[in-house]
Image: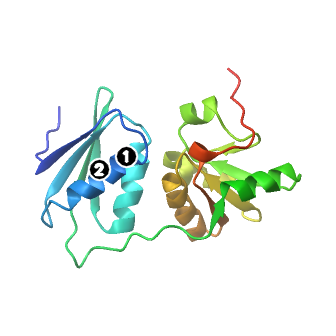
Amino acid sequence: MTQTFTANQVLDCKGLACPMPIVRTKKAMDGLLPGEVIEMQATDVGSLADIQGWAKNTGHQYLGTLREGGVLKHFIRKASPEEMKDEVPFSPEIANETVKSLLEQGGKAAILDVREPAEFAFSHIPGAISIPIGELDSRMNELDRSEELYVICRTGRRSGLACQRLKENGYKVSNVMPGMTAWSGPTEQSEQ
C-alpha cells in the first residue's frame, strides 16, 4: 500500500548536501502559516537526521519521511509562535586549527565524525570514530563518557546536533567548527 500525503508546499532540495536542505527549508517555512506542512524532497541520506534535529531544536514538528526510490520526502509542520524555539548553536565550539594543533603536539583527542559512511570513507581525520548522526542514539554506548569528544561533520550543523544529544546523555563534547570543509590537517581514506 502506497501512502500519499498532501503538503501545503513542496520544496525541491534534491542533489543538495548539508547544510543547504536545512537552509532552504528554514527560508521556505517563513512563507507558511502555523500548522501548514512542507514536503522537503532530498537525495542526501544525511538530510533525515538533519531535518529531525533541526525540527526538534526549533519547535517545528517532524512528521515523518517517505522514501521513493532515491528521494527522501520529509514532512514538517510549521509551529505556532507559542511552540517556536530560538535556534541556538551548540556551545562549546572548538576551532579546526585548535584540534589540528592538539593532534600535531601528540595530544590525545577523541574525534567523533558524525557524517555519513561514504563521506567518512573518502576523507577523515586519522583515528576518528565514525558514527553517523542517524545511528548516534543506538550507538552512543560505544563512546567513553570519561573522554572529551571533539565532534565533527562537514559544516558543523550535524555535529552541533550530535553534541546536544551527547551532552544531554552525560558526555563531555565540543563542536569542531567549521568542520571538514575547512579542515587543513591530515586526512586519510578508509581501506576497501
Q: How is the image coloured?
A: rainbow
Label 2 crowding class (10 Å Cα cut-off): few <14, some 14-19, many 20+?
Answer: some
Mark 2 lies on residue: 24
Q: Taking 115 as reference, is 22 left or right?
A: left
Q: Position of residue 166 (x, y in %)?
A: 59, 63
Please tell me whether residue 127 is drawn above or below residue 173 in the rendered image. above
Q: Secondary structure at mark 2?
A: helix
- Residue 20: which numbered mark, if any? 1
Q: Taking 91 as reference, is 13 left or right?
A: left
Please tell me whether residue 9 is drawn above or below residue 3 in the rendered image. below
Q: Residue most toward the top? A: 192
The quadrant of the rendering that contains the C terminus is top right
Seen from the viewer's position, the closer of residues 140 and 50 is 50
Q: Residue most toward the bottom? A: 82
Q: Residue most toward the right? A: 106
Q: Amino acid at mark 1?
A: Met
Q: Taking 76 as reference, is 137 left or right?
A: right
Name the residue rendered at 49%, 67% in the picture: 89
The quadrant of the rendering that contains the N terminus is top left
Seen from the viewer's position, the closer of residues 87 and 184 is 184
Q: Could you say which quadrant of the image residue 82 lies in?
A: bottom left
Q: Position of residue 150 (x, y in %)?
A: 68, 57
Residue 77 makes an appearance in the image: no
- Residue 4: which numbered mark, if any? none
CB-based contact (under 8 Å), mark 2 and mark 1: yes
